[in-house]
Amino acid sequence: MFIGLMSGTSMDGIDAALVVFGNGRPGIQATCSEPYPDALHEKMVAALGLEDPRHTGLAALDNAVGEVFARAVNRLLEEAGIERARIRAIGSHGQTIRHEPEAPVPYSLQIGNPEIIAARTQIDVVADFRTADIAAGGQGAPLAPAFHKAVFAAPTENRVVLNIGGIANITILPAARPEIVTGFDTGPGNTLMDAWARTHLGTVMDAHGQWAAGGRINQHLLDALLADPYFRVTPPKSTGREYFNMDWLAAHAQAHELPVRDVQATLCELTVRSIATAIAAHAPATGRLLVCGGGVHNTHLLRRLEQALPQMNVESTGMHGLDPDWVEAAAFAWLARQTIEGKPGNLPAVTGATRPVVLGRLFRKR
């Protein structure tokens, strides 16, 4: 058994999944979510704005986030009634503070001290998954496509796995050549919609996309947003909240001159159009789109995707054996197993690395 820990760009909390690997599809045995305390969340959001977080004292924040990750593991084991001795290792993604694969010295910084997690849980931890890929010339992201390939590829059907978290990313799984799997971050997923909802509704999200569904898409604003150079960059590519954020939106002054509900509708359409355009350009023969991540609950968003991609069956990964809320956490359990077994966890065609490499570092329980 392995445990996967995932905290995405929304920074709303930690997803923990207990995963059993056999000869078939991985089995998720138990799950839990651990929210961040409000004060800690505020400190993490503030850290996003640091000019260079590597050169700023983040040790205390790193340790505090590690404590919450450990709490998620201990709670998961307690609720599941599983003895910790049965867990081979924990795969911890950490909380991304900055992702700069195109910097003069490329890096990706995650906090959530794995030494703290190992000490508090008394289970070995695999963490720091992105550094080895970056050292091999890659973007260090996205990393889930190798797991998507192992779990969702089909020999008779071209598929795309779409994860809609704060950032949206796709994994392209061609049936004819299963060895050639590609994928990349398409752009914003939920992050801009969530931020706009927090500002104007006072809620953490636009539940089911109902607010956006009642607004009108502003074509002028949408065209301006889609004109961003990121959408034209050739993969491999990855991005994050340090790029697509409220400051990015504020640079388009017309956003603040429109009815706020229309802006939400337009932000939803930005996510839809950037995803649909990426799939049409790089995987036009796709027969089935498998969706996971928090965005799977945005019924308005999924309806718009179905309309934008009429030739595809748009389905939840739940219809293919894995609950869409826990795919990413399960992916890091799988990546931890790859590391323990000395197997590569990256796909060079996805990240741009020069070679497959074993990802992560092992932090022993003490």
Image (cartoon, rainbow, N blue to C red):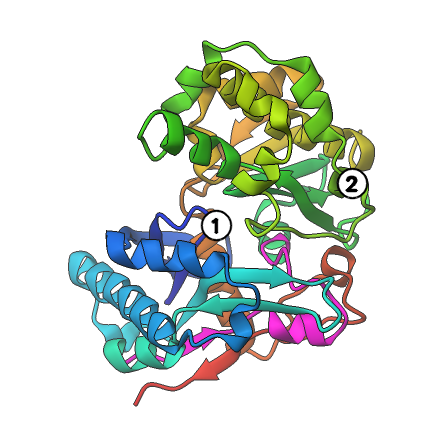
Residue 57, how many percent across, how many down?
Answer: 43, 77
Q: In the rendered image, which quarter contains the C terminus? A: bottom left
For disc 2, the marked residue is: 229
Nearer to me, 196 or 336: 196
Magenta: main secondary structure equals loop
Three-letter residue code for mark 2:
Pro
SS state under label 1: loop
For disc 1, the marked residue is: 9
Let me know if residue 358 appears in the view. Answer: yes
In the image, is 137 to the left or to the right of 195?
A: right
Q: State the residue lying farthest toward the bottom.
A: 366
Residue 73, how many percent across, how many down?
Answer: 27, 65
Residue 259, how many percent across, how many down?
Answer: 49, 13
Within-10-Å neighbours for mark 1: few <14, some 14–19, many 20+: some
Earlier residue among tags 1 and 2: 1
Q: In this view, does 211 lie above or below 154?
A: above
Query: What is the distance, in whole Å, between disc 1 and disc 2 at their CAs?
Result: 21 Å
Q: In the rendered image, which quarter contains the N terminus? A: bottom left
In the image, is 285 to the left or to the right of 142?
A: right
On whether residue 128 falls in the magenta region, the answer is: yes
Q: What are the residue bounds of the magenta stretch?
A: 122-145
Q: Are marks 1 and 2 in contact (CB under 8 Å)?
A: no
